[in-house]
Image: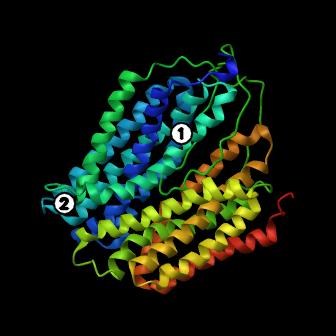
Amino acid sequence: MSEGAIRLPKERMALLFAVMLVTAAGNTAMQSVMPSIGTRLGIADVWVSLAYSWSALLWVIMAPYWARRSDRRGRKAMMALGVIGFISSFALCGAILHFGLDGRFGASLTMILFAIARSLYGGFGSAAPPAVQAYVASRTGRAERTKALSLVASSFGLGTVLGPALAPLLILPGLGLVGPFAMFALFGVIVLVLLRTQLPDDDPRFAARGEVMSAPFSASSNPRMVEDHPDGSPDELPEAEPQHQVIDRLRWTDRRLRAWLAAGLVGGHAQAMLLGVIGFLLLDRLGLRGDPDAGAGPVGLVLMCGAVATLLAQWGLIPMLGLGPRTSTLWGMSLAAAGIVPVAMGRDLHTIAVGFAIASMGFGLFRPGFTSGASLAVSPAEQGQSAGIVASVNGAAYIAAPAIGVWLYNHSQWLAWGVMEVLALGVVLLCLVAMKRDPA
């Protein structure tokens, strides 16, 4: 087989796919049941949302560190560390919530301990995605690399669909609402055992560096298009950059990036606020506050509809229509603004699900648009820095925005929807005023 056609065996690809799939599915399954758990505990909605914030902040801080470390300490070791972080976090979160729902812990103590246990995912779970990417890239030739990396990246998106779909089915007798935590921790253990026993140790054929990825809060959390890069050779595996190669540090305030990063930050906050509110909205609109256990099904259904719509935009509409960065960002946020309206006004599951799907399709167009726009705005030598900044922007939106959205929703629903619309339409205006038209 020629060097360009070097590929990974199917069983190894399946295992790497599973690493990404389980972590993404577990994360979104958790989002399906947490509004019901918070209601059962009698905790204010905003505190449930804030319990995620520390983990999101840790992901933003630690993801670049693990991405660099995987190139020096081995990709398999970093994958295992990420999976262990996922297992530990989900097992502890499930146990803490179980004791809290049983009345052994007070509600406030339960959420504090939950936030601490959740931070294990933000701190260590971020080690796995860049290590998986680098493992694949360093063992495949040019002919197979882009296809293999695209397959691995798609596992995150697929996980965001499967998580909400599986969550209601995992509410098991004896475990109740913490069933998804226990089962996904078990799935993680299975993946870890297979990873340790079936995946060979690092013996890369080519140099490669894994991209920093944001946490899988939704199907559009990691929209960066996979780009092909020239192959290295077995002799091109440096452990550090040559000292004489100095690249100016790319700053957030760089005029080439300003408009794109502003669009990403503002639009990302609109999406994060909508995701933060949607579970609590469904409990209220469907009259399930008195029976929160029944809320996991509708919440999971709506989240799944949103994830499918997002993937339809990213896997179907963008490639089929050949949308450029500005066009994708402009029409995406216009669609998101339109979708927020039926979510805000809907009184039944069907209307809310349709509105959320429309908004999610818009966000699914928007995120790859601003991401590719930021990438195209800088030179090839600055692509790594640009990717890191974009990943930070993606993650930063989820630190406080979900809790802010829930706080606004609890004080004035129309204020919450108004802020989301202003943010979405603000990005539309930014596209019209500050961004050049895509080349024909």
Q: Is residue 49 left or right of residue 71?
A: left
Name the foreground residue: 433 vs 113: 433
Say which quadrant the N terminus sits in.
top right
Is label 2 or label 1 in front? 1
Query: Which residue is located at x 61 percent, y 76 percent?
Result: 337
Residue 91 x %, y %: 26, 45
Query: Which residue is located at x 45 percent, y 27 percent?
Result: 11
Residue 100 circle label: 2
Residue at image mark 1? 152
Residue 245 x %, y %: 77, 28
- The type of residue carrying mark 2 is Gly
Query: How crowded is the residue under tag 1: few (<14 C-alpha within 10 Å), some, or many (20+)?
Result: many
Query: Which residue is located at x 80 percent, y 72 percent?
Result: 433
- The type of residue carrying mark 1 is Val
In this view, 358 is above or below 325: below
Q: Secondary structure at mark 1?
A: helix
Query: Which residue is located at x 45 percent, y 73 percent?
Result: 353
Say which quadrant the C terminus sits in.
bottom right
Query: How crowded is the residue under tag 2: few (<14 C-alpha within 10 Å), some, or many (20+)?
Result: many
Residue 169 x %, y %: 27, 57
In the rendered image, the residue lying farthest to the top is 235
Q: Is residue 431 left or right of residue 202?
A: right
